[in-house]
Image: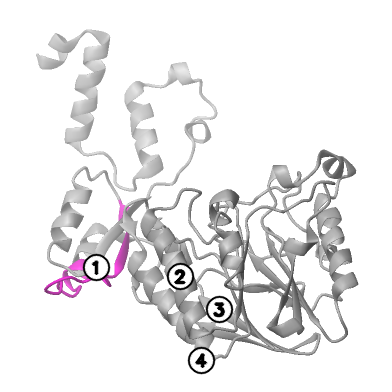
């Protein structure tokens, strides 16, 4: 049996609230469709954050349903299972679940419960690949999914997953692979440059490894955008398929292909997702002086004629030795006619960053001359001292506040 594991698509995402990612998502979904066919996948597991928000734009929902329809046409026997993440609306994502089940697409929005209050295992435990696998599809757990008594016991995750696993073990046949899903922060995961906030489930900010016992064949996780294994080789975050922030440009974006020999994982392979839009940083690391930045921008390639949806994203970080009120105008002028599009303009101060109290610890604030305070505060952010013009402007402002403008003018 072969399963493809993907996560954190964030359909409808925009960079810094302005630049739509539809072109990249469409390219990814076309590639994923081809990968499902090429790999002859028996099942596709999507572990949450299908959408970037609880109210995705119509274009994102259309992309989701068109993918499901295309996947069903391309791979008629492939099972598709998707759970909601913390960005998804359980009700919205699961609204069409009854219809989709008829197409062998299982979408679990919220944790389903029956009239007695116990977990509806018939909905959560899903046979795949003709019974060769069993997926315990646990979505992101919201407060409504976690009874108060479980919170009071202090380990709601262990209780909820324990109930699901007990039901799975009762239904699991010999040599059947058990795959368990989760959308959460796992203890021990690498959270460096974590663009996703930590989420609390019943008061727990992280799931301990003991939530996922050794008899589970594979744990498919979502939420952290950086692909990685946690604790053991068969507990995996698939990661996001594209950089959802500029800080994620160094990630290896991928989909995982997991092969099973009976109940045992025989191989896990990374299927690299092609990047269709480059991310350029000027300078490549750290910050550079304005003159150096402008020289680099001058060497950038010109804008192409016609529509160019694959224009690179550009991040610029300038080291300023003094204030530069026309910085953005200078940068935008330098980029006029260039192919990359500016997404972020950052400024790195060059001063020593010292607090005023560190500089004058032996003197009271009342003893300091205002001009001295201004100069010392200036040095916190700028390596170059204030110019005579700046000092003159400060003196005039101070004179206005004191009411002795005429003395300064004379």
Left or right: 204 in relation to 351: right
User: Residue at label 3?
Assistant: 255
Which quadrant holds residue 81?
Answer: bottom right
Above or below: residue 68 compared with residue 397: below
Residue 388 visible in this rendered orientation of the protein: yes
- Label 4 to label 2: alpha-carbon separation: 21 Å
Relative to the observer, which residue lies in front, 383 or 134?
A: 134
N-terminal of the pair, mark 1 or mark 4, is 4
User: Residue at label 2?
Assistant: 242
Relative to the observer, which residue lies in front, 17 or 166?
A: 166
Judge the density around disc 1: few (<14), some (14-19), many (≥20) Cα neighbours within 10 Å: many
Q: Are marks 1 and 4 in contact (CB under 8 Å)?
A: no
Judge the density around disc 4: few (<14), some (14-19), many (≥20) Cα neighbours within 10 Å: few
Judge the density around disc 2: few (<14), some (14-19), many (≥20) Cα neighbours within 10 Å: many
User: Residue at label 4?
Assistant: 38
Q: Secondary structure at mark 2?
A: loop
N-terminal of the pair, mark 3 or mark 2, is 2
Residue 254 within the segment the image draws in magenta: no
- Label 3 to label 2: alpha-carbon separation: 11 Å
Magenta highlight range: 296-320
Q: Which numbered mark, 1 or 4, is in the foreground of this view? A: 4
């Amino acid at each position: 049996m072969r399963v493809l594991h993907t996560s954190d698509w964030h359909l409808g995402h925009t960079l810094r609230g302005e630049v739509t990612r539809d072109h990249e998502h469409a390219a990814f979904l076309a590639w994923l469709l081809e990968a499902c066919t090429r790999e002859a996948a028996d099942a596709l597991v999507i572990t949450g954050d299908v959408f970037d928000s609880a109210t995705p734009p119509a274009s994102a929902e259309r992309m989701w349903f068109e993918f499901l329809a295309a996947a069903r046409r391309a791979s008629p026997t492939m099972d598709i299972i998707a759970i909601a993440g913390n960005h998804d609306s359980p009700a919205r994502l699961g609204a069409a679940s009854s219809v989709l089940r008829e197409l062998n697409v299982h979408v679990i929005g919220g944790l389903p419960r029956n009239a007695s209050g116990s977990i509806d295992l018939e909905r959560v435990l899903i046979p795949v690949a003709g019974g060769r696998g069993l997926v315990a599809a646990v979505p992101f757990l919201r407060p409504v999914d976690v009874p108060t008594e479980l919170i009071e016991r202090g380990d709601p995750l262990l209780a909820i997953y324990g109930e699901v696993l007990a039901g799975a073990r009762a239904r699991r046949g010999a040599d059947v692979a058990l795959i368990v899903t989760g959308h959460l922060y796992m203890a021990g995961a690498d959270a460096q440059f974590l663009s996703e906030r930590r989420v609390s489930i019943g008061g727990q900010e992280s799931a301990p490894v003991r939530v996922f016992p050794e008899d589970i064949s594979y744990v498919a996780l979502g939420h952290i955008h950086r692909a990685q294994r946690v604790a053991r080789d068969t507990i995996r975050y698939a990661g996001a398929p594209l950089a959802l922030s500029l800080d994620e440009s160094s990630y290896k974006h991928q989909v995982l292909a997991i092969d099973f020999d009976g109940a045992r994982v025989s191989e896990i392979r990374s299927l690299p997702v092609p990047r269709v839009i480059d991310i350029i940083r000027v300078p490549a690391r750290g910050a550079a002086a304005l003159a150096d930045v402008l020289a680099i921008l001058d060497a950038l390639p010109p804008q192409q004629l016609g529509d160019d949806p694959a224009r690179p994203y550009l991040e610029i970080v300038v080291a300023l030795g003094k204030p530069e009120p026309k910085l953005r105008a200078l940068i935008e002028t330098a980029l006029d006619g260039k192919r990359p599009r500016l997404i972020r303009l950052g400024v790195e101060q060059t001063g020593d960053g010292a607090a005023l109290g560190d500089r004058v610890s032996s003197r009271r604030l009342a003893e300091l001359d205002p001009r001295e305070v201004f100069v010392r505060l200036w040095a916190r952010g700028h390596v170059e001292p204030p110019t005579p013009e700046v000092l003159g402007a400060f003196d005039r402002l101070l004179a206005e506040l004191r009411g002795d403008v005429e003395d300064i003018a004379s």
